[in-house]
């Protein structure tokens, strides 16, 4: 149990002398004017793709993949054991991270974009994580996979509504750029990356800002790519000249490190927010050449080893620039591990990417959305901390609002809870920050968690078909309440979600169902009138949305 302290002790932990040192004037409207000795930390978020709970050594002692840098990050910071992606697939989870809002509330929240078929799920008027930090004086940058939707136009200037290879073939780049809903129009000052999965979806181009410097001009020749069991899920589509599939994540890393270098040179007294969004460990497993054969766990193991090395490079760069102690680094994944990759890793290498949970990517069971989440902030987060608090990626926005000392408006971050007291060891573990937690599965079906109880408002996995899928049939468990309209599990006594207690505890099932419906009707799960925990009642300013750029 963690000791409760006073607000004075809390501020002392933060390393600041007063409320004003955190909140300061100007953070509420426009960009904040920061003193040369600003207390605002730099913030780095490394978001991986389809990385499972069991893929990281500090979460899985039986892992066959070495992850020394991630293990060190956890050893020097805090590791959450009950962290979740808001959804079980890429697009809705990424939307929720960037907005602090569950994607199902958009009305199209289960969609996964495949190149075209936008527009962005993030409305132009919505306050984003990047936009909030921009308003507080941060320079914001993102490098890597976006995958929240973009607007593409055809030769007649009409928005392309179709996804996949057919939609990509209709793109007229002269009509499409500048891309109106590119990340630089959703809270980021800088962006370089891909519209979707860099090596999976049908549009293989890089976006720089809101431009496409090198359009896709030819059909992808898949015979030029690596061929092994983990190399599936690379869609036929259009590719830009010189596009290198195996180097994508290292390119994003180089761009991110160059941003830090340039920022330190030009604006050393200004904080920055950097998102590094990788393809790893999404299928196909295309590790960079320098990492091939680096593990004894095949291409997928090498791929995951590469993201660990990337984390190490980021920390090394922060230290090299002398800003490591004033940088909050967070690491997580957008959902659980892919089905085929998980099956092959179990079969060929005795490695379980979902361990110890039931389910995988797309599934509403824990393996589909319980993910690693590590945060490190030297001198602020106590080294070696472990928390069992339930949290999701939606909580990053309210937590960062607390870090910079502003209260969020009620029409933003509707599902985001402030986890800063947990980061800093100020929250007792037996006092949950979240009264309940929502997740959504591949088909848009919802789940709700409160304490040990988890209610799935549907039958089956919510994503994968365990009856028809040849690979997944082996992992199907008997349904002990086949006539139930939903599923109820007690994760404390049944972490493997093997026994549906829907009928045996119908009272709890009904209560959670009611709470879920109430949250849907209200449009939010977080309370109104939130005050950032870092400053309490005094000094809390209301954050005002910037006008759309």
Image (spheres, rainbow, N blue to C red):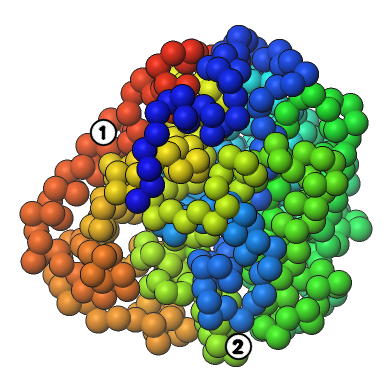
**In this picture, residue 188 sits left or right of residue 451:** right
Local secondary structure at mark 2: helix
Image marks 1 and 2: residues in contact by CB distance under 8 Å? no
Q: Residue at x 14, y 48 (%)?
A: 511
Furthest residue to the bottom?
Answer: 348
Local secondary structure at mark 1: helix
Residue linked to disc 1? 521
Residue 530, by quadrant, is top left
Q: Is residue 290 visible?
A: yes
* Front label number (1 vs 2): 2
Between 445 and 348, the one lying in front of the other is 348
Q: Residues within 10 Å of mark 1 (few under 14, many from 20)?
A: few
**In this picture, residue 296 sits left or right of residue 97:** right
Q: Is residue 125 visible?
A: no
Mark 1 vs mark 2, CA separation in Å: 46 Å
Q: Residue at x 54, y 29 (%)?
A: 12
Q: Residues within 10 Å of mark 2 (few under 14, many from 20)?
A: some
Horizontal and vertical percent for residue 443? Answer: 40, 57
Above or below residue 476? Residue 3 is: above
Q: Residue at x 60, y 30 (%)?
A: 15
Mark 1 or mark 2, earlier in chain:
2
Residue 360 tag number? none
Position of the C terminus, as image quadrant, is top right
Residue 210, by quadrant, is top right
Above or below residue 262? Residue 232 is: below
Horizontal and vertical percent for residue 72? Answer: 65, 61
Residue linked to disc 2? 349
**In this picture, residue 120 sits left or right of residue 1:** right
């Amino acid at each position: 149990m963690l000791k409760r302290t006073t607000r004075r002790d809390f501020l002392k932990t933060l390393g600041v002398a007063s409320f004003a040192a955190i909140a300061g004037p100007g953070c509420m409207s426009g960009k904040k004017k920061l003193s040369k000795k600003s207390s605002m930390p730099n913030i780095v978020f490394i978001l991986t793709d389809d990385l499972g709970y069991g893929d990281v050594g500090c979460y899985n002692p039986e892992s066959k993949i070495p992850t020394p840098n991630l293990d060190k990050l956890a050893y020097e910071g805090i590791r959450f054991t009950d962290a979740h992606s808001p959804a079980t697939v890429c697009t809705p989870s990424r939307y929720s991270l960037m907005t602090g809002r569950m994607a199902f509330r958009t009305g199209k929240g289960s969609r996964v974009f495949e190149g075209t078929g936008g527009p962005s799920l993030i409305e132009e008027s919505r306050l984003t994580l990047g936009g909030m930090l921009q308003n507080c004086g941060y320079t914001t940058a993102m490098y890597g996979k976006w995958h929240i939707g973009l607007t593409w136009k055809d030769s007649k200037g009409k928005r392309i509504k179709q996804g996949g290879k057919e939609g990509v073939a209709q793109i007229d780049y002269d009509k499409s750029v500048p891309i109106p809903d590119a990340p630089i129009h959703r809270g980021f000052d800088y962006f370089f990356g891909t519209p979707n999965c860099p090596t999976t979806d049908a549009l293989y181009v890089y976006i720089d800002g809101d431009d496409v410097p090198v359009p896709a001009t030819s059909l992808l020749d898949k015979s030029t790519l690596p061929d092994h069991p983990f190399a599936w899920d690379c869609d036929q589509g259009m590719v830009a000249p010189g596009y290198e599939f195996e180097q994508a994540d290292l390119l994003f890393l180089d761009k991110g490190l160059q941003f830090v270098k340039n920022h330190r040179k030009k604006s050393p007294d200004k904080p920055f927010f950097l998102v590094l969004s990788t393809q790893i460990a999404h299928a196909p497993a295309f590790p960079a050449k320098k990492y091939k054969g680096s593990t004894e766990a095949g291409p997928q193991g090498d791929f995951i080893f590469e993201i660990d090395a990337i984390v190490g490079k980021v920390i090394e760069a922060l230290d090299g620039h002398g800003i490591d102690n004033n940088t909050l680094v967070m690491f997580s994944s957008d959902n659980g591990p892919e089905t085929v990759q998980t099956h092959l890793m179990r079969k060929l290498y005795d490695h379980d990417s979902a361990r110890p949970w039931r389910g995988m990517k797309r599934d509403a069971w824990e393996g589909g959305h319980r993910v690693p989440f590590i945060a490190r902030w030297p001198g602020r987060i106590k080294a070696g901390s472990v928390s069992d608090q339930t949290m999701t990626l939606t909580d990053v926005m309210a937590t960062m609002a607390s870090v910079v000392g502003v209260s969020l408006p009620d029409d933003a971050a509707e599902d985001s809870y402030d986890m800063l007291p947990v980061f800093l060891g100020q929250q007792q573990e037996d006092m949950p920050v979240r009264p309940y937690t929502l997740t959504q599965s591949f088909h848009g079906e919802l789940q709700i968690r409160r304490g040990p109880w988890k209610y799935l408002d549907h039958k089956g996995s919510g994503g994968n078909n365990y009856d028809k899928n040849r690979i997944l049939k082996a992992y199907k468990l008997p349904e002990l309440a086949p006539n139930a309209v939903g599923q109820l599990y007690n994760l404390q006594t049944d972490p493997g979600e093997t026994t549906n207690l829907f009928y045996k505890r119908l009272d709890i099932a009904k209560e959670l169902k009611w709470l879920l419906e109430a949250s849907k009707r209200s449009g939010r799960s977080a309370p109104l009138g939130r005050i950032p925990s870092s400053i309490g009642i005094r000094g809390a300013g209301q954050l005002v949305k910037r006008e759309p750029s």
